[in-house]
């Protein structure tokens, strides 16, 4: 299917991807069409092993080499200078390319049998919640995708951490499945994380990862009272109940009790948002976790799920 220019949804440890042959500009263009994604938003090239990295980029700075050795296969994406075989369609016209080796047996089997790069964004419509099961992909993209490889639910549940490794001092472009602390421990220096309020790189718009329901973030101790008030005012409210309040009865449409473990929270996050949409909620009240470890990526996604929506 990939060799014929088709689109294949594939499981990874982060979220499901919508894959195409990275060297086939027409197939890559179809990804943007199916997702409704602006062509300026670059994609990630997925490789079967780290040895292929040099074939896809111009040069690999020492820090990038170190990170690839330590974290691949895994939820880390490296942005490097684009090699000549990467079509500009896949990079949104940029002279850099994002590359990673996913840590999922099905993805790795596909990549190694295909033998080349598969470029894949998350397998959802532009701006909406990323899919973490094959059913999410089928429900959202249906016949627009030629084949859906079902590899079970995604283990990590949030997207990869994106690191700009083009220069000597790497920086985090998007927090994700590899924590800032783990990156810093390997690099031996501290890394800055971008604020979510400004668009730093293409594809990092304030509203993204958003369910149909409007998401409102409040302090943890206000979640229950704000949610019940909104329900009384006529909203169909879904609640992300902090684990500390797990036993509180909440008079709203639907309640998700947030797992105390950040790994479990990340794994469940997008499914929770989809479930609350399914329950007919028009408003979701949530609070932010402590922003360390995986909490940083979770908070980033919640902020952007709550971000200003484009006016249609
Ligand atoms: P996704 O949004 O899940 O499709 O993952 C792709 C993301 O990778 C994009 O939204 C960008 O934020 C990021 N990305 C890909 N290529 C580049 C690049 N060359 N420079 C900066 N960010 C990139
Ligand atoms: Mg995406």
Image (tube, rainbow, N blue to C red):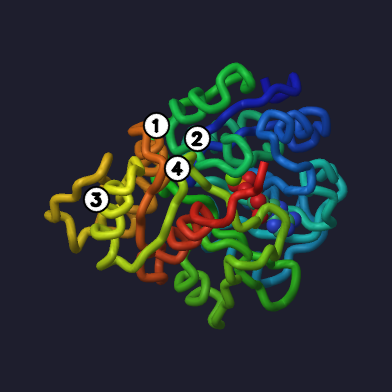
- Judged by depth in the image, the label closer to the viewer, 3 or 1, is 3
Residue shown at 68% from the left, 78% from the top: 169
Q: Quadrant of the N terminus?
A: top right
Q: Dot 3 surroundings within 10 Å: few (below 14), some, or many (20 or more)?
A: some
Q: What residue is shown with label 1?
A: 152
The disc at residue 257 is 3
The disc, 4 or 2, on the residue closer to the chain's N-terminal end is 2
Q: Is mark 3 within 8 Å of ligand 2?
A: no
Q: What residue is shown with label 4?
A: 213
The disc at residue 52 is none
Residue shown at 50% from the left, 52% from the top: 305
Say what secondary structure mark 1 lies in.
loop
Measured Cα–Cα span from mark 1 to mark 4 = 26 Å
Residue shown at 38% from the left, 52% from the top: 266
The answer to whether one can see residue 49 in this image is no
- Judged by depth in the image, the label closer to the viewer, 4 or 2, is 4
Please state if 116 lies on the left or on the right of 110 as rendered. Answer: right
Say what secondary structure mark 3 lies in.
strand
Measured Cα–Cα span from mark 4 to mark 3 = 18 Å
Measured Cα–Cα span from mark 2 to mark 3 = 26 Å
The disc, 1 or 2, on the residue closer to the chain's N-terminal end is 2
- Judged by depth in the image, the label closer to the viewer, 4 or 3, is 4
- Residue 27, given in percent of the width and then of the height, sits at 76, 28
């Amino acid at each position: 299917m990939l060799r014929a220019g088709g689109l294949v949804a594939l499981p990874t440890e982060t979220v499901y991807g919508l894959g195409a042959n990275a060297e086939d500009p027409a197939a890559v263009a179809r990804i943007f069409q199916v997702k409704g994604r602006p062509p300026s938003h670059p994609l990630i090239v997925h490789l079967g092993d780290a040895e292929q990295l040099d074939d896809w980029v111009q040069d690999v700075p020492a820090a990038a080499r170190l990170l690839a050795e330590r974290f691949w296969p895994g939820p880390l994406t490296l942005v490097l200078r684009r090699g000549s075989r990467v079509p500009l369609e896949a990079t949104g016209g940029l002279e850099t390319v994002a590359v990673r080796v996913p840590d999922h047996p099905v993805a790795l089997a596909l990549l190694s049998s295909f033998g080349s790069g598969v470029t894949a964004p998350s397998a959802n419509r532009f701006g909406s919640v990323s899919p973490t099961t094959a059913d999410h992909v089928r429900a959202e993209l249906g016949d627009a995708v030629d084949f859906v490889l079902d590899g079970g639910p995604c283990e990590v549940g949030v997207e990869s951490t994106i690191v700009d490794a083009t220069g000597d001092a790497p920086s985090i472009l998007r927090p994700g499945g590899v924590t800032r602390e783990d990156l810093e421990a390997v690099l031996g220096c501290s890394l800055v994380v971008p604020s979510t309020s400004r668009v730093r790189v293409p594809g990092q718009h304030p509203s993204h990862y958003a369910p149909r329901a409007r998401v409102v973030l409040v302090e943890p101790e206000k979640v229950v009272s704000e949610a019940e008030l909104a329900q009384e005012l006529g909203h169909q409210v879904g609640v992300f109940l902090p684990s500390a309040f797990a036993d509180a009865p909440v008079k709203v449409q639907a309640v998700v009790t947030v797992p105390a473990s950040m790994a479990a929270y990340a794994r469940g996050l997008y499914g929770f948002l989809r479930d609350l949409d399914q329950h007919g909620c028009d408003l979701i009240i949530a609070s932010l976790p402590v922003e360390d470890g995986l909490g940083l990526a979770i908070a980033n996604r919640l902020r952007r799920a709550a971000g200003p929506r484009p006016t249609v």
